[in-house]
Amino acid sequence: MKKSLITTTLPPYIDRYIQLAEDTELVDGLLASLTLFDDYLPELERVADKQYAPGKWTPKDIIQHITDNERIMAYRALRIARSDKTALPGYDEELLANNTNANNRTMVDILIEFKVVRQSNIILYHTFKEEMLLRSALCNDIEITPLAIGFVLIGHQVHHLNILKERYFTL
């Protein structure tokens, strides 16, 4: 299904990610973004442990955050797609980021983990029928569908790649 079939209005902090994703078939977009970081591997390795300002995440932290977010959002999509209407809580991204082992790992290892998680989510999204993608439930007090979540996954990755290019690759 395409992004244009997202019919609900979402808050700007979520919608900004959806807007960064192309209006393509969702699984095609997830597949295309699977290798998005590959062209930037030399730059990612060069700046892997750097911060562009005090207190900011390193590129390793950023990619680990993308992976952690991917897991959480996929869990939400699964629950909603399977007709679970239980309101799902938000999460504290800073808490998660402060409790990883990202900076003791290699960039390649972190990227492999991201790809494995994304591949798992591609398989998950392949299992969803159209009606499942359009079901909705509350996540962090926002009514959202698995379809919207899938495009958030793509756009969230693009958003952070843009930050890496603008703030880290120039270091």
Image (cartoon, rainbow, N blue to C red):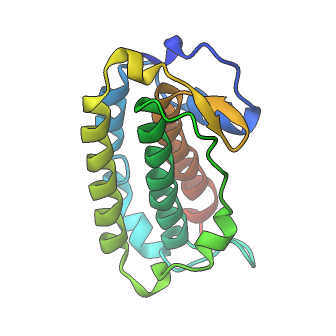
Q: Where is residue 128 in the image (x, y as percent from the top left)?
A: 31, 27
Look at 70% across and 34% down and name the residue there. Answer: 142
86 sits left or right of 27 in the view? right
Which residue lies at the image location 63% right of the left edge and 78% below the top edge?
A: 98
Viewport quadrant of the N terminus: top left
Q: Residue shown at 57%/48% (left/top)?
A: 162
Which quadrant of the structure image shows residue 52? Answer: bottom right
The answer to whether residue 115 is above or below residue 79 is below
Work out whether residue 134 or residue 23 is closer to the camera in this orientation and state it. Answer: 134
Residue 86 in view: yes
State left or right for residue 71 relative to residue 128: right
Residue 66, above or below 51: above
Viewer-proximal residue among 124 and 153: 124
Res 57 seen here: no
- In this view of the protein, which residue sits in the foreground, 39 or 70? 70
Image height check: is 4 above or below 81? above
Image check: 139 left or right of 132?
right
| Snapshot quadrant of residue 62 | bottom right
Residue 127: x %, y % from top left: 25, 31
Q: Which residue is drawn at 40% across and 73% down?
A: 45
Q: Where is residue 99 in the image (x, y as percent from the top left)?
A: 57, 80
Q: Quadrant of the C terminus?
A: bottom right
